[in-house]
Image (tube, rainbow, N blue to C red):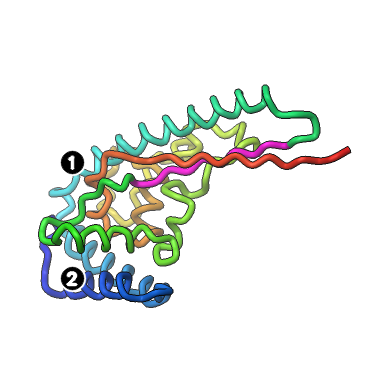
Amino acid sequence: MYLHNKDIERIEEEIVLLYETSSSYDSEAGRILLSLRKDMINDRVLKRQEDILPDIIAFNDALRDALHTMYDRAHQIWDNLKLIVNAGEEPELTAKCFLDKEFSLTDKVDEARREILWNAICDSDWNILYEEGITLTPLTLPRDLDMSFDTLIGMDCLPPNWNEGLDRELTKDLHLTSAFHHLFRHTDFAITDFITVQKFRTEIEININSHQQ
């Protein structure tokens, strides 16, 4: 998909080797390699953005749906949780969304190396701004009880289109979400790592703080 070349292949080989052989994972070196790989791929792909525009649209739509499901599920669990907590207990719910482990990197990477590469890209010790998932910040209740879904995905600001770094004219009507922006601009995923993903996973964590009388 992204006009694979020998330089990118060598960087990916270095990532796989480092991730597979280092017992403690050299996080700093890993972050540098991931950033370099991202820049090299994006530099090539974004010269022909019209070719990936359908994938960008499909991914943004799937991402919006996944986040809406997460948002609704988190609020439903919270409503049920409030009915069962005891006096003096203060519950907190945190919801995060991640790319599913069913991934699509590049056709030229064999299956075993492909999985190691994907694991390295998704490792929050390496890809540190992916630790909290796809959204800019996780959804946390009760702190975010008044946050609308549009606010969560950045559609309450003008213009509602998080297309920084893309062709402004080509993407002006796409209503890209802040979560798309986070993946594209702030994490170390190359754009081709995620725009073909159509499945997501949600993590919901509940903590209850007790205050004894």
Residue at point 48%, 49% (across, down): 136
Residue 110 point in image, percent of width and height: 14, 60
Q: Report if residue 61 lies within the magenta region.
A: no
Q: Is residue 79 above or below residue 132?
A: above
Picture coordinates of residue 87 (x, y %)? Answer: 79, 29
Image side of residue 122 versus residue 51, left or right: right
- Quarter holding the N terminus is bottom left
**Dominant SS in magenta:** strand
Q: Is residue 66 left or right of residue 113?
A: right
Residue 54: mark in rendering: 1
Which of disc 1 and disc 2 is earlier in sequence?
A: 2
Residue type, mark 1 in image: Pro
Q: Quadrant of residue 155?
A: top left
- Region of the chain picked out in magenta, as a range: 90-99
User: Along the line of sight, which residue is nearer the eye, 72 or 54?
Assistant: 72
Whole-number angstrom distance, CA of label 2 to CA of label 1: 24 Å
Q: Which mark is residue 8?
A: 2
Quadrant position of the C terminus in the picture = top right
Q: Secondary structure at mark 2?
A: helix
